[in-house]
Amino acid sequence: MSSSPSVIIIGAGFGGLAAAIELKRHGIESFTVLERHDHVGGVWQANAYPGAACDVPSIIYQFSYALNGDWKHRYGRQSEIREYLDKVARDFGILPHVRFQTKVTAATFAEDTGTWAIDTEGGDTYTADAVICATGQLSEPAIPPIPGLDTFAGHHMHSAEWDDSVDLRGKRVAVVGGGASAIQLVPAIADEVEHLTVIQRDPSWVVNKYDWKVGPVERAIMRIPGMPRLYHDAMWWWFEVRAPSVKSSFDWLRGIWAAERRRHIKKTLKDPKKVAAATPNYTFGCNRLLLSNDWYPTLAREDVDLLGEAVTAMTPTGIVCGDGTTVDADVVIWCTGFKATEYLSPIDIRGRDGRHIREAWADGPEAYLGLTTPGFPNLFMSYGPNTGSLTNTIVYLVERQAAYMRQAIEYLGRSGGWIDVKPEVHDAFNARLQERMQHTSFAAGCPGWYTTESGKVTQVWVGSHVEYGHRTREFDPAVYEHHAVRELAATAPR
């Protein structure tokens, strides 16, 4: 048989759009994108806090087949990236396939028909032959269950759920967390608030960000035919050559860099208490390196306090820290990250024999090539387990994943039925991946969202982007079990 399987894509960020565009470009129109927000953009739709920006140069943080050479900054701001994704979705005709404000709550596989039933919060159920989960690793905000949180009399919000109606002017503001969102947000609001307190249990390693506003000369150069492609490819390879730097054999180099950072922190902050609270006590490079030129100068301000403590309780007037310190606040902003190791949360996903994906991932999420997990046939993932990008751009990886998933869907169109990655293939891949991980900086056991509580690294890709591209270049039916069923399904809700 030869037909187009029906496909549901969950999410309209980079991963979801990459999958949709890949299908569309190869003549597959039988797909529907379900997006819980009212706009495309994914993380760049949700994270609209002051100062939100990318930490990958704009020229490579875009689709390789839709290059924009007219970025306003070297590192794109949230609004500009969102506008780019909106334009791409329109240019490639994806918007007619998108169902906005449609939050997926469950996905259940039926072995007798080989189809997935996708339930939504609005009560609709879609039926499809294949599902592509493009919800991202950073989509579900995490606010810790702090005792007394409900008693706080002021405003509190997560950075990924920014409330523009909250006026920060003249307010005492407490920011909890010291990760990527905090280092962008804190400098952006410091001049606006009356007093700012940053509470971070685990400080991050922060390095310089070589950013600038693109001037008229650079803009003119980028309008030369072929120049955006040349610049994109040159920058991509510039970052790609850094891939070996995550290996343990480069510990000496990371040690030199860490020493320089410690000197910079001490020189900038001066106050011994602030220096202690801002200096990480774990291996440089075992977690995400953050980029900012304003973070340490902002922490050094007299109207900014820095506490290296955990938040243990909330009161009607503020925060109680682990050492007993109380912080009075009118507004509390949680920069406490996302449920990254609970990938696909909070969708209730059940595969063969009704097995829940949480059961399959009891020790943390894992998948073959970060794309598919045994027991969940015809379910694919974009930006799945262990495919986070550190040394280059995630956009390259989601493009490669999209091409692989498209090939798999074409195979399903030719053969019918459903496919399930063989457990022995999946297990061997992940065993080797974790073995390789032990020879990198990620195995140093530092805090953060790369690892589960047991210490298993579940977020980052261990090799180069070239290697990942090679591994996903061709879909191989031999690594999958194939099961025949009667007919293909329809994507329309029933």
Image (cartoon, rainbow, N blue to C red):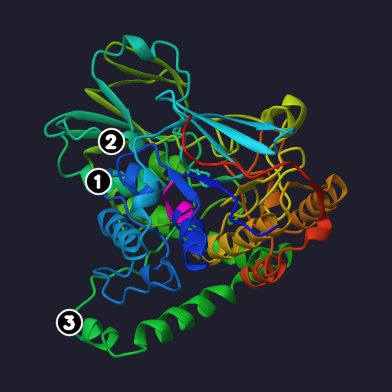
The amino acid type, in three-letter code, at marker 3 is Pro
Q: Secondary structure at mark 3?
A: helix
Front-lying residue, 436 or 347: 347
Residue furthest left as drawn: 170
In the rendered image, the vertical position of residue 456 relative to residue 352, given as above or below: below
- Identify the residue under disc 2: 162
Q: Earlier in the sequence, mark 2 or mark 3?
A: 2
Question: Residue, x 27% and y 70% (percent of image)?
Answer: 71
Judging depth in this view, the residue of 35 and 43 nearest the camera is: 35
Mark nearer the N terminus (3 vs 1): 1
Q: Determine contact: label 3, label 1, CB under 8 Å.
A: no
Label 3, label 1: how far apart the Cα atoms are: 26 Å
Query: What amino acid does circle 1 point to?
Result: Pro
The answer to whether the residues at label 1 and label 2 have Cβ atoms under 8 Å apart is yes
Q: Is residue 253 magenta?
A: no
Task: Indicate the quadrant where residue 292 lies.
Answer: bottom left
Residue 387 placed where, x, y %? Answer: 62, 55
The amino acid sitting under disc 2 is Trp
Give whichever of 363, 442 is nearer the camera.
363
Magenta region:
11-16
Q: Secondary structure at mark 1?
A: loop
Which residue is pictured at 23% across the width and 69% down the height?
72
Residue behind mark 1 = 50
What residue does disc 3 label?
A: 216
Is 120 drawn above or below residue 99 in the view shown? above
Quick check: can you spot residue 348? yes
| Residue 492 in the figure: left or right of residue 389 | left
